[in-house]
Amino acid sequence: MSSPISAVSQMLQRNQAFFVGKRLLICGALEDDYPHQLGTLTSALTVFTTDYCYYRRQQRALGAAVVFDHQLAGSPRFDALLLLMPKAKAEAQYLLAMMAPLLEPSAELFLAGENRGGINGADKLLALYGDKSIKRDSARRCSLYHSILSKPVAPFVLDEWLRQYECHAGNTSLTVLALPGVFSAEELDDGSKMLLDNLPPMAGELLDFGCGAGVIGSVLAKRNPDLAVTMVDINALALESSRRTLAINGLTATVRASDIYSDLSQPFDHIVSNPPFHAGLNTFYAATETFLCQAPAFLRAQGRLTIVANGFLRYQPLLENHFKQTEIVSSDAKFKVYLSRL
Ligand SMILES: C[S@@+](CC[C@H](N)C(=O)[O-])C[C@H]1O[C@@H](n2cnc3c(N)ncnc32)[C@H](O)[C@@H]1O
């Protein structure tokens, strides 16, 4: 018996005749085994995702058909594209521009998602690629839009999608490069700035958890030339942004995908983070709670964890449960910086 599927997948299932026999590219997350079911109807299926958690969950069912990256490599060709609406519209624009050159002329274009996730802006997004789109289905607060690729498609140039800005944290200036939808893509976050203003000189090995565009790890690598920095994130666009930020500043660090500690083994002398507290559309602290609770296992004996968080988030009791000593080293009306020692 197959497991229950989401409202979006049920809507796609009602319309799946469109996908039969096609070389189908799905981009984004369907949180069930419907991608696998679709694979039995299509002539070829590729599922592209920028989300490492989703990639790990789907790998068992889809094997090499699921790809985690910031860009689909090579020159595969597709007859149909199904984009699951990402939470940031700028990311949807980026993904469509990246995938459109891989589509055959007159390919089918589908955009699906929940109404609260902005799917009703789909017709504007699709207007760049085809004539008027049709709303094929709408039920249980989800919608499916359909268009045909009929307009000329420009080659995809990644550099055109990078935002660049200068940021200043204490005496350190940094050029930041960020792809659409990445946290702090436009300017340094006030919380990250407060964190950077409260970090002493550092040596040894440092983990920047949830690196985003790479601001924290890059500023610390610049200030502390002997510090070995590792940056992790689950978002492929964040990881590529971090690589670009490091490169433009002439810095080096290890940048890798990891869902919390999934791909990490060594202990660090320092862990620093402006940890996530929104994931998708629901406020969600589970990843950050796991990150904080398991931090002691990834720190050396004299290791320190320093994080910044919105003042209303109740991280202090959690930190006090897992570390011998926790203090608030800075706070204002919005943020607190916590320093925890083993
Ligand atoms: C608040 S942002 C901070 C970004 C960056 N450090 C800065 O200060 O600008 C949190 C980051 O954590 C990442 N993230 C969310 N869940 C994660 C997980 N389970 N494992 C690793 N990183 C995660 C997000 O993609 C996001 O880039």
Image: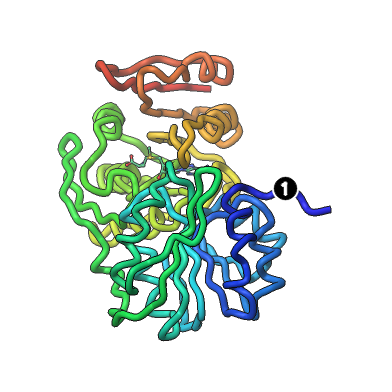
Q: Amino acid at mark 1?
A: Pro
Of residues 198 and 234, the one drawn nearer to the viewer in this rendering: 234
Left or right of residue 165: residue 61 = right
User: Which residue shows up at 34% across the image and 20% down it?
Assistant: 336
Q: Position of residue 303 (x, y in %)?
A: 49, 30
User: Which residue shows up at 70% across the image and 64% down it?
Assistant: 37
Q: Position of residue 69 (x, y in %)?
A: 47, 64
- Indicate whether 143 appears above or below 38: above
User: Which residue shows up at 39% across the image and 64% down it?
Assistant: 95
How packed mark 1 is, by other alpha carbons closer than 10 Å (few <14, some 14-19, many 20 or more), is few
Q: Ligand 1 quadrant?
A: top left
Query: Can you name the residue that lies furthest to the right here?
Result: 1
On the image, which quarter does residue 159 sit in?
bottom left
Q: Position of residue 328 (x, y in %)?
A: 36, 16
Query: Can you name the residue that lies furthest to the bottom here?
Result: 105
- Indicate whether 89 appears above or below 224: below
Q: Position of residue 292 (x, y in %)?
A: 53, 29
Is residue 200 visible in the rendered image? The answer is no
Left or right of residue 187: residue 203 = right
- Indicate whether 263 appears above or below 200: below
According to the image, label 1 marks what residue?
A: 4
Of residues 112 and 304, the one drawn nearer to the viewer in this rendering: 112
User: Which residue shows up at 69% across the image and 56% down it?
Assistant: 33
Is residue 161 visible in the rendered image? The answer is yes
